[in-house]
Amino acid sequence: MKSIFDFSTPAKRFRFVAILEAITWLALIIAMIVKRVADNDGAVAVPGMVHGIVFVAFVVVAIITAVALKWSPGVTALALVSSIPPFGTLVFEWWAARKGHLAELSTGPVEAAAAAA
């Protein structure tokens, strides 16, 4: 069984922070709706701060992962850009795993080539 709290490799740390970034995006979106509907300006204070911290953590972890897994500049740029739209980190993580960019988490060509070697 896969554990989301297994931080033993760069790819697993990246996956965790990507999921966490998406969750904080969801919390921030809900808070923005509450702010508008209930006319409560304070509704976004905590979710906004938490999302900001996790956003910065994602950027740092993405760069560390890019170096550790030897991502190309293009893949690294996609990872960093994925943090901007809501849930983009999940889309990138799924894509990177499918294309073989996430080491042991990958199901794509890079993993198959490594297994054959």
Image (spheres, rainbow, N blue to C red):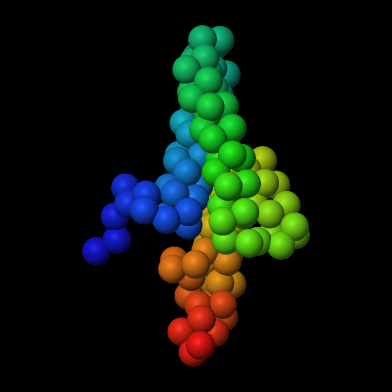
As displayed, is residue 47 above or below residue 29? above
As displayed, is residue 47 above or below residue 17? above
Total label count? 0
| Residue ranking furthest to the left | 1
Q: Residue at x 58, y 47 (%)?
A: 64
For residue 53, say whether it is visible: yes
Question: 83 and 9: which one is in front?
Answer: 9
Q: Is residue 101 left or right of residue 46?
A: right
Residue 22 on image: x %, y %: 50, 42
Q: Residue at x 57, y 66 (%)?
A: 101
Residue 92 on image: x %, y %: 59, 57
Q: Residue at x 57, y 80 (%)?
A: 109
For residue 34, say whether it is visible: no
Q: Residue at x 47, y 43 (%)?
A: 17
Residue 98 on image: x %, y %: 54, 71
Residue 24 on image: x %, y %: 48, 34
Specify the quadrant that holds the N terminus.
bottom left
Question: 57 and 40: which one is in front?
Answer: 57
| Residue ranking furthest to the bottom | 116
As displayed, is residue 93 above or below residue 52? below
